[in-house]
Amino acid sequence: MNRYQYTNITNARYKTTRYPKFPVNANDTYIITRTGDRLDSLAYEFLGSVEQWWILAEANNLGKGTFAVEPGIQIRIPFNVFNMSDRLQRANMEK
């Protein structure tokens, strides 16, 4: 899934993409990062797609300009990321 799929385009310019929230859930998974971990590789390992790296970034307030993740920090893997296409579309509907 392309994370810009539901981003509005005005005059051939992208507007800011709004991301859905990922509230803490009792079924979330927590990991401690290792040396060499990256948001895209963790997304592949836990969510099944490197394209979903932004879910981990949003849920953990990471990824400002890099995929690299500092080793030894706790990362939350959100439990309910199903229907992400619908949630992303709803977050970006014009008001």
Image (cartoon, grey):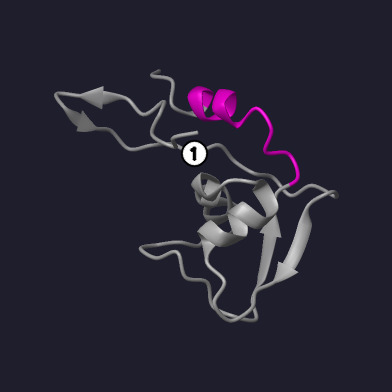
**46 magenta-colored:** no
Q: Position of residue 72 (x, y in %)?
A: 65, 81
Q: Position of residue 29 (x, y in %)?
A: 78, 57
Quarter of the view holding residue 37 = bottom right
Q: Is residue 12 above or below residue 49?
A: above
Q: In the picture provided, is 66 more to the left or to the right than 77?
A: left
Disc 1 residue type (three-letter): Tyr
Span highlighted in magenta in the image: 79-90
Q: Position of residue 88 (x, y in %)?
A: 52, 30
**Residue occupying image coordinates x 58% and y 46%:** 49
**Residue occupying image coordinates x 69% and y 53%:** 46
Q: In the picture provided, is 4 more to the left or to the right than 60?
A: left
**Residue occupying image coordinates x 53% and y 56%:** 57
- Name the residue furthest left: 11
Tell me if residue 40 can be seen. yes
**83 magenta-colored:** yes
Tell me if residue 61 can be seen. no
Residue receiving disc 1: 19
Tally the numbered discs.
1
Q: Is residue 28 above or below residue 37?
A: above
Quarter of the view holding residue 15 = top left
Q: Position of residue 25 (x, y in %)?
A: 79, 47
Q: Is residue 73 above or below residue 91?
A: below
- Name the residue furthest right: 26
* Secondary structure of the residue carrying numbered label 1: loop
Quarter of the view holding residue 75 = bottom right
**Residue occupying image coordinates x 36% and y 29%:** 7
The quadrant of the picture occupied by the C terminus is: top left
